[in-house]
Amino acid sequence: MATSTQTDLPSPRSDPFDISASSAAGFSHNIRRLWQWMHPYRLRIVCALLFALLTATAAVLMPVVFSRVVIDDILMQSYPLHAPDFGQKALTAWFSELSGSEPLFAACSLYLFWMLLRVVFGYAFDILFSSAMQAGLNDLRRELFAHVEYLPASFYDRVRVGQVLTRITSDIESLSELLSSAGGIVAELIPFGVALSVMLSLDATLTTEVSPFLLLVVLVTMGFRWLSGPIYQRIRETHSRLNEHLHENLSGIEVVQLYQREGLNAERFAGLVGGNRHEESRAINIETAYYPIIENIAYPAVACILWLGSQHVQQHTATLGSIVLFLQFSDMLFRPVVMVGYQASIIFRAAVACDRIFKLLDWQESLAVPSQPTPLPADLHGRIEFKNLSFAYETGSAVIRNFSLAIRPGENIAIVGATGSGKTTLTRLICRFYDVPPESLFIDGIDIMQIAPAEIRKRIGVILQDFHLFPGTIYDNIALGNPAVTPEAARHAAKLVQALEFIETLPLGFNTVLEDRGNNLSQGQRQLLAFARVIALDPEILILDEATASIDPITEAAIQAALIRVIANRTTIIIAHRLQTIRNADRIVVLDRGELAEIGNHNELLGKNGLYRALYEAQFAE
């Protein structure tokens, strides 16, 4: 049995999105990991923090002007010489003398000046910090997408696409909300530090007496984190299941409507919504208890400042302006902590999203690639050889059993068999979507496990019954970004597979923009584009997996005639259920439950009265 390799991770059968072991320590580690995406934008972050410091300075000087200069010096005229004013009294006197205005007018003008600087510097901080955070997350999103693009097919055998979509979209958005909240908290924490240092310089005793209220806020926040953390994790899980359900049902809407599953799907979706609503309601119940507590703790602190501060004023150890300044600074002390409380739901939701993102990003499942891959020769002949190959998907029993076959260069081989006999699996192994046992599959005599997967796929063209068209023009879907496929080469390929005629009838020809999944073309026209896409690459090995199943008989006959020229001098493997399409194959391989049952040309196999004859007669019984 072949399985994909992994490094420092659980068994491939484990869930790559299991975050049951997440913790606060893990979240702290993940937040530190985010720095590697923010590091390229560190200059913006440093400048933003500088503007935050300037904003904090202006925010602190505004109440200093109001309290120490206006109240104590101008109105009360009780300004003690030892009380710090950070130069605001001298600056007010200088401006009053320079402008010839009253000291009160000069003080009010200075207050407005600091307010204006606070607004300007705050705006600069928001712009720089937000742009750095969004640029870093954009890089993370791109890296995450590139990572899932390179994960092997075995990963997607176990994981739903909706789960991956949730990580790249809504989970990244949760991180965006987290970092935006972090910017607001940083903008408040710097004034917090400045205000605390000023309060200590003004009256260390009163500052110490108020500090227990801050400790109480911290304890309440920690308790909220302990209660709500698991709930937010379950909210993210239910949200992920909602996305998965939406993706699966909307992508298959035609089947849903055809089999009248609208009611059943709506009922299942309602159950998922109910589960999400239950967890959201639990979170809301905790939040509605937490927010009033965290908000109202500040009011007893204000009362404490008024009570104790009044005593200090009466004892002539503090001025009225000092108490007013303390009251204004108390808001700067409590506001960051209260903001953390308000942002707690965002932070805890983002903690779960962060775990999920890094769990996926750290999932290192990959195909085994030798340290020094053997290159395929430039003049690849296309000889393919299976030697006692056995293979099983990770979640099931063996699909291929002791399969041996040598395909000669340029030979046209057809593979037939009942559904589930392993036909498509053989072609996926040739394309190196899975690891196989060493010395069991060879291309031109080279063990496929010694060749880089990307190197193999450059030399093999695959045409599937169920293929994908990308957004863009018809030419874009033929070239697929390959600069070697020029417009002339695309035109030649389209002509070779009988697609040029319908392309030229379109208003913009090869520049016609395709709608979602190519819905402005018929199924047969989309299939012809798939043929042209592969032929334009000029591969040495060609695999057709039910490639003409969606084409009408007339078009199919024209393509079969074209294929005679296309497959000349190419090793070709054709998988087909309609046996009339492979009657001219050089050899026909008959599979039965993963084992080689028969081999020969059409007439030879009919003469054996074996499985092929039974399949043939069943198909043409009428």
Image (spheres, rainbow, N blue to C red):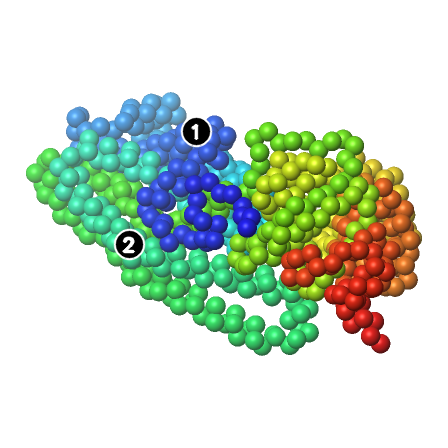
Where disc 1 sits, the SS reads: helix
What is the quadrant of residue 117 in the picture?
Answer: top left
Q: 365 and 23: which one is in front?
A: 365
Q: In this image, 583 relative to 420: left or right? A: right
Q: 58 and 348: which one is in front?
A: 348
- Residue 109 at what x, y percent from top left? 38, 33
Q: Which mark is residue 453?
A: none
- Asked whether the viewer can see residue 533, the reply is no
The residue at the point 62 percent across, 35 percent down is: 450
Query: Is 265 rendered above or below residue 317?
Result: below
Tell whether label 1 touches label 2 (CB within 8 Å): no
Give the foreground label among 2 and 1: 2
Query: Is 402 rendered above or below residue 65?
Result: below
Q: Residues within 10 Å of mark 2 (few under 14, many from 20)?
A: few
Q: 552 and 209: which one is in front?
A: 552
The residue at the point 77 percent across, 59 percent down is: 576
Where disc 2 sits, the SS reads: helix
Q: Residues within 10 Å of mark 1 (few under 14, many from 20)?
A: some
The Cα–Cα distance between marks 2 and 1, rounded to whole angstroms, is 33 Å
- Residue 403 at what x, y percent from top left? 66, 52
Name which residue type carries label 1: Val
Q: In this image, 118 relative to 621: left or right? A: left
The residue at the point 57 percent across, 54 percent down is: 392
The residue at the point 52 percent across, 70 percent down is: 269
Residue pointed to by mark 1: 46
- For the image, the number of numbered tags is 2
- Asked whether the viewer can see residue 315, the reply is yes
Sooner in the amino-acid sequence: mark 2 or mark 1: 1
Name which residue type carries label 2: Trp
Residue pointed to by mark 2: 226
